[in-house]
Image (cartoon, rainbow, N blue to C red):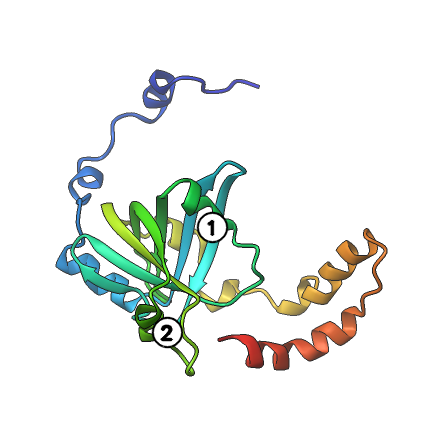
Amino acid sequence: MKKINTIEELESRYGEAVDRSLWKETDHINDHYKQFIEKSPFLILATYGDKGLDCSPRGDPAGFVRIINDNCIQIPDRRGNNRLDSLRNIIQNPDVGVIFLIPNVGETIRLRGKAEIVIDPQLCKSFSIEDKAASSVLSIKVEKVYYQCQKAIARSRIWDQSSHVDRSELPTAGQMNKVFSASRNIEFDADAYDQNYPEHLKNTIY
């Protein structure tokens, strides 16, 4: 199987970058990019540490990402499973990448920068939802930001209801957990887990 092994081979196969793809890159958040970020309720955070790469979802009502100025954003970190993969990576390596998505919008915003984990009580409290402060806040110094065109979203039809999958076609969270529990000889009631999860989610989402 033939592979590409050098930058020269890669550029030869794909050709030069489209000029507009370079024009749209900035080293700060301009007014247009600010509008996109402020409307985004969901993002993917990419980090890299000594155990490799991690991509983690983050979501809250639109506006949850705070734009401090043209060169800095802050993202609240909420309670979760305490794996802390992304946070561990940031301590080891502050370089992060972020993709912002907005429902029913084709363009996405891509941002790269350096992050630090802030635990100032007042700052965490300022990100409170349902009287629950953020566990910490990721403060990211922006190094590069640009918009991605609609092609990936259009190809995936992710916002098109006709492409949506019925949840019943996939294994439930309980069923997936049961497989891993069995491999550890741990008794696990998948049906009870799935039945109780909506209430658990309501009680622990913040």
Does the rendering let one see residue 158? no
Amino acid carrying mark 1 in the image: Ser
User: Of 41 and 51, which appears nearest the observer?
Assistant: 51
Dot 2, crowdedness within 10 Å: few (<14), some or many (≥20)?
few
Indicate left or right for 159 with 71 as reference.
right
Residue, disc 1: 86
What residue type is disc 2 on? Pro
Q: Residue at x 35, y 20 (%)?
A: 7
The residue shown at (62%, 78%) is: 200
- Compare residues 173 and 15 and report the one nearer the observer: 173
Whether 146 is drawn above or below 127: the answer is: above
Residue 94 visible in the picture: yes
Residue 155 is situated, as x and y percent measured from the top left of the image, at 42, 51
* Quarter location, residue 33: bottom left
Residue at 51% x, 62% y: name it: 163
Secondary structure beneath disc 1? helix
Give the mark count: 2
Closer to the camera in the image, 81 or 17: 81
Expressed as whole percent of the image width and height from the top left, the position of residue 142 reads: 24, 48
**Label 2 – label 1 distance at C-alpha:** 21 Å
How crowded pointer 1 is (Cα within 10 Å; few <14, some 14-19, many 20+) is rated as some
Quadrant of the frame with the N terminus? top right
- Residue denoted by label 2: 61
Compared with 88, 77 (above or below) is below
Q: Earlier along the polypeptide chain: callout 2 or callout 1?
A: 2
